[in-house]
Every structure is written in C-alpha cells, then in structure tokens.
Image (spheres, helix red, strand yellow):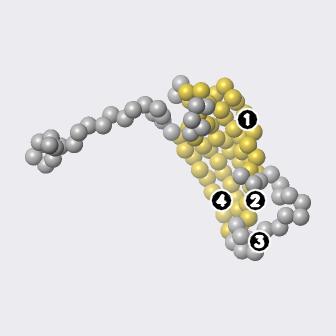
Amino acid sequence: VGRIVWEVEDDDAVVEGRPATRYSLSLAEPAEGEEARPRADVPLSLSGEVVLDEATATRLSVDVEGRYLAGGEDERGVKLKLMRSGFGQPPAIETPTDARGDRPR
C-alpha cells in the first residue's frame, strides 16, 4: 500500500488446481517533495511476486524481498517466502483418545 506497485503477470495461473492470479511487486519512487518522518522506517527496495486465489483472494504463494532503513539509519533486509498447500481441502480430524485408550464421552 502507499508506494507498493502491483502488476498482473499471469491472470491464468493455476496453483494445486485452483485458478489464481500472479502479481509482481515493486516499490515506487517517493512522491516529489515527500520526506520521511524523523526516526521512521524508510523503505529502500521491494521486489517479488504474490499469487492470489481467484475465488477467495487468499495468498497461495509469496516470494518477496525488500530493504529499508530502520529508524532512518540502519539498513536491514527482509525476505518472505510462503507456499500454502491443501487449500480448500477439509482436514482429516480424528476424535482424540484419553491415556487409557477410551474415547471421550
């Protein structure tokens, strides 16, 4: 949001059989005259991609890297990788047993 730029790379993507949209992310230049607040975190770079499920907009995968100035002074890097699997499939949940092997009543 703000300076993050989203661009559709593939609106016919499929992840685990689910229709999805693949977006590339980048960081836009600051607006002319825009200044960072003192001691604020200042974004320097952002790149990567996000794949969203078409039906629910759930993030199916993310691979993003960025750099920023922490407190306006110390440069730091961040990476996020996420891959969701089994989305939309009901989990197999079994009734627990107690220590004696009896089922709860």
Name the quadrant containing residue 55. Answer: top right
Q: CA distance from mark 2 to mark 4?
A: 10 Å
Looking at the image, tell me whether mark 4 or mark 1 is earlier in sequence order: 1
Towards the viewer: 101 or 62: 101
Residue 4 screen position, x and y as percent? 74, 50
Q: Which mark is residue 37?
A: 3
Task: State which quarter of the image contains the C terminus.
Answer: top left
Report the amino acid beneath label 4. Answer: Gly
Q: Report the mark closest to the observer, 3 or 2.
A: 3
Report the amino acid beneath label 3. Answer: Arg
Q: Image point 55% across, 44% down: which residue?
A: 82
Q: Report the mark closest to the observer, 1 or 2.
A: 1
Q: Image point 55% across, 27% down: which residue?
A: 18
Q: CA distance from mark 4 to mark 1?
A: 25 Å
Looking at the image, tell me whether mark 2 or mark 4 is earlier in sequence order: 2
Q: How many marks?
A: 4
Residue 54 screen position, x and y as percent? 61, 31
Report the amino acid beneath label 1. Answer: Val
- The image shows residue 36, relative to residue 17, as above or below, that is below
In the structure shown, which secondary structural element does the residue marked by tag 2 occupy?
strand
Mark 1 Cα-neighbour bin, 10 Å: few <14, some 14–19, many ≥20? few
Q: Which mark is residue 44?
A: 2
Q: Is residue 104 left or right of residue 15?
A: left
Which residue carries the number 1 mark? 8
| Labels 2 and 4 touching (C-beta < 8 A) | no
Q: Residue furthest right?
A: 32
In the structure shown, which secondary structural element does the residue marked by tag 3 occupy?
loop
Q: CA distance from mark 3 to mark 2?
A: 15 Å
Which residue carries the number 4 mark? 77
Q: Image point 73% across, 60% down: which residue?
A: 43
Q: CA distance from mark 4 to mark 3?
A: 20 Å
Report the amino acid beneath label 2. Answer: Leu
